[in-house]
Image (spheres, rainbow, N blue to C red):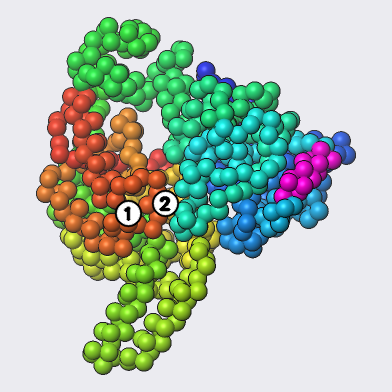
């Protein structure tokens, strides 16, 4: 463990054993193979394999890989499954139900026998819940106990729905959901107020009795709680930390989820390392942070005081290695990210506001530099519009048509249809087609206004409306051939020299990552066809910025640039003041963006580089699939 040391790396100084994979797909393949091996071993002994299974975004890739293995011959006919949890009090058919989730994403795609599938019953009468939970435990014992428990982890450290301060020896039971858990689920229920307050969960004691435990986590938003779980004390405040008591538990992470682990982010603290340029840069920037000094003010004692003796011996003295990193960072500052000669550029924007929020200042610079600047809006973003905004627009159009004598009857029919639909809509249910179209038009108009504000021409705006997004719900369809065709057709038509892609790649089913996958697949196909491909720069969304050592291009922004960028963001009125999917950050999108850009400039200044008002940061795509 792991089988392929070139793509998975053990983390020192943590418990349970923890491994980091370069991509989520590699993690999924590795995890699925462990499960498949257990199934084969049990089958060879004439026994059934018993699996404990979770829902959520982190295990999705594992299920996808297990389905692929099934198509290649892996049978689940002798597999028994027990799901870890389920919301209580919602119908099994509801979109947010884990019963429906498991069937649509895994169970319906393999040869599991229905009688071997166990998912907590969300609709069991309240007076029968206690007996039902005891029976669930009995079924696990009758099956021989769980061979492999696959786990995700919540932002508060829960596994299953064992929330903070759950009892270590607890069993399957009805529990009350923690506020952090309900907040994390708010997007799927279209509002925290619609998230159930209770759930049925397998207990910590039951999970700890599994013969093998695999905890998987993807994304930066999991990095802090992963650090607490594997580096902090064993405490009921962080239920996942209890896994340190298990004799065969393994934690499997992508690089984003591992970024706050000491043995991953600062490996020189835990022992000897091989010093390459990237690690030297990371160590020197970390040392600046620890000492509060700029790069060129570091001395040999700073290296010795912070466990960097080995680096000093091999690459010192201090001023020599610090100057190398200073030059590397200075070279990342780029006023003209596409060069000075006129080029064709495409900014791919997953949602209709990612362009101006994430790289609005760079768009201003590209336009000012005379580049033919295209923006491709990949999805409609219609699910992020409040119902009252759709109703307001339907009413406005009816009144507009009345005043100008334009088919008032048809517009009133549409308004009545919209009003009736929204009045009767259950929380979390998809909108009817008319409502989705109105919400799409709202986002489209705002996107156009924002793009024009930063100087782009309307003829260079492309509203792709990729089919994978068109579900009317938070959960999207798999990417299909039509999605790929649309992207490839745009790239072939514009023939860009440079493209910008949203680089939030950790969430395996987030819209940003899915959009990036479609673009990268088109570029890989072009390379295979022997065609020239554009330079690809990745930007981050509203929530995170690249770490300083990751940044390859930093575009300085003036106060005028930031003012114009802010005004472009303000054009997205449906997302201002209060957004439908704001995330856990209470700031408005323009505030997050502005403070992030100014923070990046501050970090450059703190290490001794020129002082700028703000900066937007990018990294280059390596050319590898994700």
Residue 538 falls within the magenta-colored stretch: no
Say few, some or many: other residues with alpha carbon within 10 Å of mark 2 (under 14 / 14 to 19 / 20 or more): many
* Residue 297 at x, y percent in the picture: 19, 15
Q: Label 2 to label 1, Cα distance in Å? A: 9 Å
- Where is residue 455, by image quadrant? bottom left
**The disc label shown at residue 512, or none:** 2
- Where is residue 615, by image quadrant? top left
**Numbered circles on residues, count:** 2
Is residue 171 visible to us here?
A: yes
Which residue is under mark 1? 354
Tell me whether circle 2 and circle 1 mark residues in contact (CB < 8 Å). Answer: yes
Residue at (55, 45) in percent of width and height = 177
* Start-end of magenta stretch: 129-142
Q: Seen in the image, is 118 located left or right of residue 320? A: right
* Residue 98 at x, y percent in the picture: 63, 53
* Residue 359 at x, y percent in the picture: 26, 49
């Amino acid at each position: 463990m792991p089988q392929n040391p070139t793509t998975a790396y053990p983390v020192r100084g943590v418990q349970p054993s923890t491994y980091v994979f370069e991509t989520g797909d590699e993690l999924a393949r590795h995890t699925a193979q462990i499960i498949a091996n257990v199934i084969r071993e049990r089958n060879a002994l004439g026994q059934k394999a018993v699996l404990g299974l979770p829902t959520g975004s982190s295990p999705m890739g594992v299920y996808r890989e297990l389905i692929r293995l099934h198509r290649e011959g892996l049978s689940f006919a002798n597999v028994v499954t027990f799901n870890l949890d389920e919301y209580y009090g919602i119908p099994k058919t509801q979109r947010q139900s884990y019963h429906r989730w498991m069937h649509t994403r895994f169970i319906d795609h393999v040869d599991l026998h229905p009688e071997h599938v166990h998912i907590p019953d969300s609709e069991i009468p309240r007076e029968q819940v206690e007996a039902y939970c005891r029976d669930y435990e009995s079924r696990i014992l009758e099956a021989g106990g769980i061979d492999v428990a696959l786990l995700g982890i919540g932002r508060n450290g829960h596994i299953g729905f064992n929330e903070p301060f759950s009892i270590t020896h607890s069993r399957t039971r009805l529990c009350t959901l923690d506020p952090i858990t309900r907040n994390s689920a708010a997007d799927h229920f279209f509002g925290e107020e619609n998230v159930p307050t209770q759930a049925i969960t397998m207990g910590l004691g039951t999970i700890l009795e599994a013969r093998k435990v695999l905890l998987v986590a993807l994304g930066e938003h999991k990095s802090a709680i992963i650090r607490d779980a594997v580096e902090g004390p064993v405490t009921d405040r962080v239920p996942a930390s209890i896994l340190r008591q298990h004799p065969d538990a393994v934690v499997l992470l992508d690089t984003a989820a591992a970024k706050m682990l000491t043995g991953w982010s600062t490996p020189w603290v835990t022992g000897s390392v091989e010093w390459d340029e990237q690690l030297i840069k990371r160590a020197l920037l970390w040392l600046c942070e620890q000492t509060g000094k700029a790069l060129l003010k570091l001395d040999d004692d700073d290296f010795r005081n912070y466990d960097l003796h080995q680096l000093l011996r091999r690459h010192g003295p201090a001023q020599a290695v610090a100057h190398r990193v200073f030059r590397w960072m200075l070279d990342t500052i780029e006023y003209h990210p596409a060069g000075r000669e006129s080029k064709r550029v495409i900014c791919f924007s997953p949602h209709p506001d990612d362009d101006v929020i994430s790289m609005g200042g760079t768009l201003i610079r590209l336009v000012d530099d005379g580049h033919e600047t295209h923006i491709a809006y990949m999805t409609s973003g219609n699910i992020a519009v409040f119902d009252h905004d759709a109703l307001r627009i339907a009413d406005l159009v009816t009144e507009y048509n009345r005043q100008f004598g334009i088919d008032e009857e048809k517009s009133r029919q549409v308004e009545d249809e919209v009003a009736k639909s929204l009045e009767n809509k259950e929380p979390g249910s998809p909108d009817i087609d008319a409502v989705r179209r109105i919400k799409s038009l709202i986002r489209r108009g705002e996107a156009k206004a924002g793009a024009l504000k930063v100087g782009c021409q309307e003829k260079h705006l492309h509203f792709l409306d990729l089919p994978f997004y068109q579900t009317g719900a938070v959960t999207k369809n798999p990417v299909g051939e039509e999605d790929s065709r649309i992207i490839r057709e745009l790239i072939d038509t514009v023939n860009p020299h440079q493209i910008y892609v949203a680089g939030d790649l950790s969430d395996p089913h987030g819209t940003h990552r899915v959009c990036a996958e479609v673009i990268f697949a088109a570029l890989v196909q072009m390379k295979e066809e022997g065609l020239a491909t554009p330079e690809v720069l990745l930007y981050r969304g509203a929530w995170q910025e690249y770490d300083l050592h990751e940044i390859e291009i930093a575009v300085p922004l003036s106060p005028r640039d930031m003012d114009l960028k802010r005004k472009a963001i303000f054009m997205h009125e449906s997302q201002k003041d209060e957004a439908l999917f704001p995330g856990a950050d209470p700031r408005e999108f323009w505030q997050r963006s502005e403070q992030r850009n100014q923070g990046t400039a501050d970090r450059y200044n703190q290490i001794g580089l020129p002082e700028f008002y703000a900066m937007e940061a990018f990294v280059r795509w390596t050319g590898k699939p994700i």
